[in-house]
Amino acid sequence: MVKRYGVPTILAVAATVLMWSTTFASLRATLGYFSPGHLVFLRWWAAAILLLVYGAATGTRVPARRDLPAIVAAGLLGFTVYQIALANGQVGLTAGSAGFLINLAPMLTTLLAAGIGYDQTHKWTWIGLGVSTLGIVMLGSAKGGFGGSLPHAGLVLVAAASFAGYVLVSKPLLKRYRPIEVTTYAVVAGALPFVVWAPGSLAALSNAPTAGLLSLAYMAVVPGAISYVMWSRAVAGLPAGMAARFLYAIPVIGLGVAWVWLGEIPSLLAVTGGLVSVLGVALAARQPRPSAMPEPAIPVIEPASATPLSA
């Protein structure tokens, strides 16, 4: 795996998984100080400004006009819809539960990628996805199920589908732009609609205690700007479906983060489900011998060449 795709790509995947594993605990904590609307506005406008300043200092290119529709679509899917749905959905869910539900995104990404010819699949893909999904079901059941929070769970599922679309829309852009450029374009495009929550945001910011400000800053920088750059780097070097399948590890690590940060103590069933989910990731990432790999029935879009990050 490492030799085939390169150390920088694998490190980018690992960094993304670790940073995004803290998202749900930090989001749950930050929602104690800000409304969902104020949170998405403050978090993603801060991230957008940070990326724009960095881009101005390092020579980020202006995107070509022909790529603007794809950039707008990536921004709407990966940030506008995803962040609004996730923030409002997590109001009624624990950090662990939201993490379990959002990680249906790898399944959706794989299905969509295979359907439009981006990726090839084989028996280990489906065995691994099935095992990982079983693990996530066990994790969710360990938290008492989602029957009492179906509207909020539905919003998180919308976020999962939106993120799957973002992965596939941004993939072709990574053939022409650096990962940090694609991330910057998408964050700026996706953050623009959040201005509807600008009124009252400064007042919420000024009234927030130090703990709230630190949590907000962390969300904007770590599981915000930096992690999305790392994710773009990972998607540039891996097939879209394979990159997404590594995200199954997020709720497992997130259990420990939620335990330390929020005091959400996982049950034995949750831990068992987490181990099953990790096993599924390993199975889904397994590659068959070249002789066993069938020729694709439709052309496959090759991954973009690995471009070194300037960050």
Image (cartoon, rainbow, N blue to C red):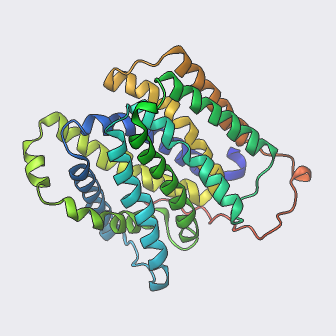
**Is 114 positioned to the left or the right of 261 in the image?**
right
- Residue at 46%, 23% (x, y): give it: 144
Residue 12 vs residue 90, the one in the foreground: 90
Residue 222 visible within the image:
no
| Image location (x, y in percent) of residue 159 | 45, 51
Is 10 left, or right, of 29 in this rendering? right
Task: Count how many numbered circles sit on residues in the image.
Answer: 0
Percent x, y of residue 220: 30, 49
Q: In this picture, is 41 found above or below 86?
A: below
Image quadrant occupied by the N terminus: top right
Q: Residue at x 49, y 28 (%)?
A: 145
Residue 241 to residue 127: above or below: below
Note whether residue 292 is visible.
yes
Question: Residue 296: where, in percent of width, then height?
Answer: 82, 64
- Find the residue positioned furthest to the right: 291
Q: Nearer the viewer, residue 100 or 20?
A: 100
Q: Residue 279's quadrant in the figure?
A: top right
Asked if residue 161 is positioned above or below residue 183 in the image, the reply reads above
Outermost residue toward the top?
Answer: 268
Using residue 134 as the reference point, say whether residue 87 is left or right of it: left
Image position, residue 274 (x, y; %): 57, 26
Residue in view at x 86 percent, y 53 percent: 293
In the displayed structure image, the side of residue 299 where residue 90 appears, left or right:
left
Determine whether 22 is above or below 42 in the image. Answer: above
